[in-house]
Amino acid sequence: MKRIYLIALISALVAGIATYMFAQSVISNNDPNKDKSEVVYAITDVPAGTQVTAGNVNTYFSTRMIDNAAIVDGAVRSLDEVVGNTSSGYIYAGEQVSIKRFGTEQEANAGLSYNLPDGMVAYSMSAEGVTGVDGYILPGDTVNILAMKTGDGKATVDTVLSDVKVLKISTNDVNVDTSNAIVTYSSITVELSYEDADILYGVENSGEYSGYKLILNKRTAEDGE
């Protein structure tokens, strides 16, 4: 008799475990957040050089669930991670936030050298008027550089560099305006490899080219880094 009770008890335990596992499987399959994770995103434009504090973090940022496949490298997962940091570039409303978009206040105030990737340099170039898209370039944008070459009685246009990242522009106005504002600047500073810096210097000074023009590329909220 005891053996029968023992068998019945074991059977009941096995059935209970199986029922629990089945229920968990059903819940998991119906979970709308399956294969999603929480990340931080900007709810408004965040100017470069903004120091994030416990008092203003909710003014600039919030969290939401997104597909794991869409999470950017270095994604910030909680608001606490950005408190105490300073934005190193312009962050657009709706942009998923990477920790690479921040530095300490000391780093932000020290200049570009803290934020340059290995093997890259900062290069400043003239960008006045229509040459520089007439005031619509902002830090974080990318541009193509077209140059006109003259010789043998004819002119040709070359795309000498593509997808060049803009680090800074020669004005502080952009730090308080929206991304739709027209900004007056005379030069911009871009991020280049050493080799591309040599190419651009040659375009500006060798005499082989008679002039150049910047072309602004489309930017999305996911861009950036």
Image (cartoon, rainbow, N blue to C red):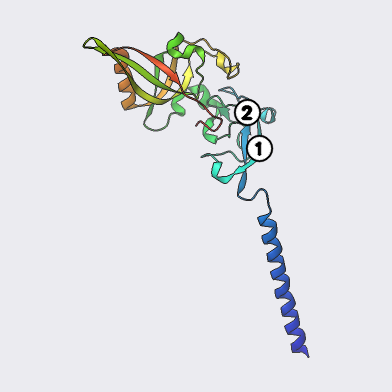
Give 17 or 133, whichever is nearer the viewer. Answer: 133
Q: Quadrant of residue 221?
A: top right
Q: Secondary structure at mark 1?
A: strand
Cα distance between the residues tagged 1 and 2: 15 Å
Residue carrying label 2: 52
Q: Which quadrant holds the N terminus?
A: bottom right
Looking at marks 1 and 2 on the same chain, the residue that comes earlier in the sequence is marked by 2
* Residue 8 horizontal/vertical position (percent): 75, 82
Give the numbered dot on residue 174.
none
Residue that appears at 36% across and 18% down:
146
Task: Name the residue nearer the viewer: 75 or 163.
Answer: 163
Dot 2 amino acid type: Val
- Could you tell whether 116 is left or right of 4 in the image? left
Residue 37 position in % (x across, y down): 62, 45
Dividing the picture into quarters, in which one does residue 195 lie? top left
> Which residue is the site of mark 1?
63
Count of numbered circles in the view = 2
Task: Place residue 128 in its image quadrant.
Answer: top left
Height in image: 84 above or below 183? below
Q: In the drawing, does residue 126 fall left or right of residue 63?
A: left
Mark 1, Cα crowd under 10 Å, few <14 / some 14-19 / many 20+, is some
